[in-house]
Structure formats: structure tokens, C-alpha cells
Image (cartoon, rainbow, N blue to C red):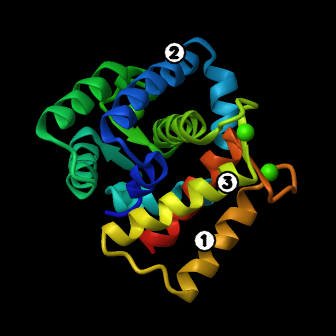
Amino acid sequence: MKLFGLVAAATASPLNWAVNTWWNEALNVYDFASNNPAAFRDAVNSVGDAAYTPSFQYCGGNDGIVSAQELTVCAAEIAEYVGMSQSSQNFVYNFASKYWDVVDTDSNGALDFDEYKLAIGAFAATNARVVIDAYDNNGDGQLAGAELTEWKNQAIQAFGNWGWSVDGQTYAALQAAYANAQTDGDFNTCSMLEIARFQLNAGNVFLQ
Ligand SMILES: [Ca+2]
Ligand SMILES: [Ca+2]
Ligand SMILES: [Ca+2]
């Protein structure tokens, strides 16, 4: 399961900083989603269904819903893949349990596609905020120039550590994912929304 590996690629090292920052940003995102459900839903849906469909199907959504059990299995695969410790995995599980009600809007214990998009959208938003925290050296809320280069180099290095070879075809697909993620037409800047969109697009490159 390589979809969420991009998270760790984006957050780089040291791992503890990444983990702590991730929890903080996840809280920020879930607080926002809880307090502004309509605005959050609009942002999630602005990306388009195609960004969410592959992982929904991968996580057992072929029958229309991803059960809590299916999502737990998926999450465990991800955690194993990125080398998360057991205590961190437990934390994730508790965290997801606590905020389950935010995304399971009809409270039936499973996620339909609309609910799944909220969950994955929150995940992507959290990751994007962590990337900004990590690489936005001048504090203007987006990545540009050397900041973008540093993020990209860190990601390529992480791919190598996991034994992924980003060959010509994959690299071209990732470039297309980056281009598709742009909302302002300026490839030399990456806002939080553009980073989140890129992660969703790029994850699908590795999933397919
Ligand atoms: Ca539901
Ligand atoms: Ca910046
Ligand atoms: Ca841009």
C-alpha cells in the first residue's frame, strides 16, 4: 500500500518531529472540519472524485462502502509500510476512533464514498499542513523556489529508501499529477491546497 507513503516522503526527518507535528495538524484539521462542515466538504469535493476513487476501491469500497474493519486493515498496511511503531499505530487507531463521527455522517459504522472523501480529504489536508510546516522557510504559507526543491529532493530520497524506483514513466505521471494539482496556474508555487491535491493525485500514480 503505497498511497500514503507520500506522507512520510513529504515530512522527512526527524521522525519524531514529523509525528508530533502531524498529530497537531490533524487536530487542527479535524477541529476545522467539525466546526465548519459545509466549508470543509466544499474544499474536499473541489478536488474531484477521480482523486479519491482508486483508494476507495483499494480499501474495499467496491460494494459502495468501506467498513470500519476494512479501513482498519488499510491503515495497518500503511502503518507497516512506513515503519510506524506499535504505540504510534495505537495512537492513530484511537485518534481515528475519536473523530470517526465527524466523517461517518449518517452514523452507520461504515463510510460511503462521500464520507470516505471527507476522511481522506482530512488526511491529505493534514499532510499538506505538515509539508508547509516543514519546508515553508520564509513563512508565507506556500512553497516556492528553494523550498519546493528541498521538498522534492526529500521525497525522491525517501522513495529510494523504500526501494521505489521512480522511472521515466512514473516520473512523467508524477509531473502530470503536479500540473493537475495547480489551482493558480503557477507551477513554481505550491499552496496548501495544491500540496493536498498533488498528494491525492500522486498517491493514485503508485496505486495503479
Ligand atoms: Ca456512514
Ligand atoms: Ca514559502
Ligand atoms: Ca501554484
Residue drawn at (52%, 42%) of the image: 124
Tell me if I can see residue 47 in this picture: no
The image shows residue 94, relative to residue 62, as above or below, that is above
Secondary element type, mark 2: helix
Question: Which labelled disc corresponds to residue 148?
Answer: 3
Front residue (pair 96, 48) = 96
Query: Circle 1 sits on which residue?
Result: 174
Question: Which labelled disc corresponds to residue 149?
Answer: none
User: Of marks 3 and 2, which one's residue comes earlier in the chain?
Assistant: 2
Residue drawn at (48%, 42%) of the image: 120
Residues packed near mark 3 inside 10 Å, few (<14), some (14 to 19) or many (20 plus)? some
Q: CA distance from mark 2 to mark 1?
A: 31 Å
Q: Amino acid at mark 3?
A: Leu
Q: Which residue ends up furthest to the top in the rendered image?
A: 35
Residues packed near mark 2 inside 10 Å, few (<14), some (14 to 19) or many (20 plus)? some
Front residue (pair 46, 162) = 162
Q: Is 118 on the left-hand or right-hand side of 110? A: right
| Quadrant position of residue 40 | top right
Tell me if I can see residue 55 in this picture: yes
Q: Nearer the viewer, mark 2 or mark 1?
A: 1
Q: Nearer the viewer, mark 1 or mark 3?
A: 3
Given contact means CB atoms under 8 Å apart, are the residues at marks 1 and 3 in contact? no
Q: Is 51 on the left-hand or right-hand side of 87? A: right
Query: Circle 2 sits on which residue?
Result: 31
Q: CA distance from mark 3 to mark 2?
A: 28 Å
